Image (cartoon, helix red, strand yellow):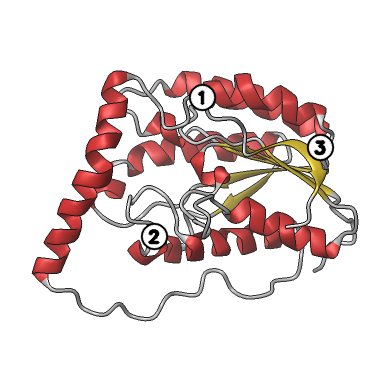
Amino acid sequence: METNAPYTSLVAIGDSFTEGMSDALPDGTYRGWADLLAGRLAARYPGFRYANLAVRGKLIGQIVDEQVDHAAAMGADVITLVGGLNDALRPSCDFGMVRDRLEQAVTKLAPNCRRLVLMRSPARRGPFGTRFLPRMHQLFTILEDLAERHDAVLVDLFGGTVLGDPRMWADDRLHLNAEGHRRVSEAVWQALGHDPEWDWRTPLPPAAPVSWHLRQAAHARFAREHLVPWVGRRLTGRSSGDGRPPKRAELLPYDG
């Protein structure tokens, strides 16, 4: 059933997932599901405003310290919060701390918007994703509890098995590609009460077979271009978002 309540503003906070990596535009910038959603809401509701405070690489403590108060003060109709997965992917993760910081964020945000949106993040099928599934489920349990207690919407992207298809992911195997972000946008659109425009869970056609040699070449390229730099940042305490400003720091009219 289509919602009767207009959503005239959106603030998105979080990490690379919400920043839009790796839905790359021709100029090298990233678009992503939040920008796509903002464009659709702007087309529906005149005067629609949008801010995106997300910065790649941020841990949940950084999201809370750097983004939550700013987002709450904007008084937007909708706030989306996706965070904690970067913590869960680290070799040592204090889930008690993650729970406390998410609780702090949700407690602050929920009373300062009409609709707070949380998400069960998608996971790419394969050895890397499978290794971290127990940690992801720990994070999901925290989010489910928070959504229930604070009347937040919880979008189940993980349950949409199509988003586990490797063809939905960029070469770095950590971020969705353009098609993945398009599907997330539709999932959130529907979660906000809008009529579906299409079924974002529709599976992709069967994949064409890939030779052993091409698979091994892809694995080697992934390790060289993405895995080794990622491990290097973890070992040195650096982040890809160090020194990077928010994507869209002010709640302003959105014209796409």
Q: Is residue 95 above or below residue 218?
A: above
- Say which label, 2 or 1, has the lower sequence index: 2
Label 2 CA crowd tier, 10 Å (few <14, some 14–19, many 20+): many
Q: Which mark is residue 164?
A: 2
Query: Is residue 99 shown to the viewer in this render?
Result: no
In terms of secondary structure, where does tag 3 sit? loop
Q: Which residue is mark 1?
A: 243
Q: Amino acid at mark 1?
A: Gly
Label 1 CA crowd tier, 10 Å (few <14, some 14–19, many 20+): few
Residue located at (47% from left, 25% from top): 242
Pointers 3 and 1 in contact (C-beta within 8 Å): no
Quick one: quadrant of the C terminus? bottom right
Residue 2: quadrant of the picture: bottom right
Q: Which mark is residue 197?
A: none
- Say which label, 3 or 2, has the lower sequence index: 3
Residue located at (78% from left, 59% from top): 41
Q: Which residue is mark 3?
A: 113
Question: Of tags 3 and 1, which is closer to the observer?
Answer: 1
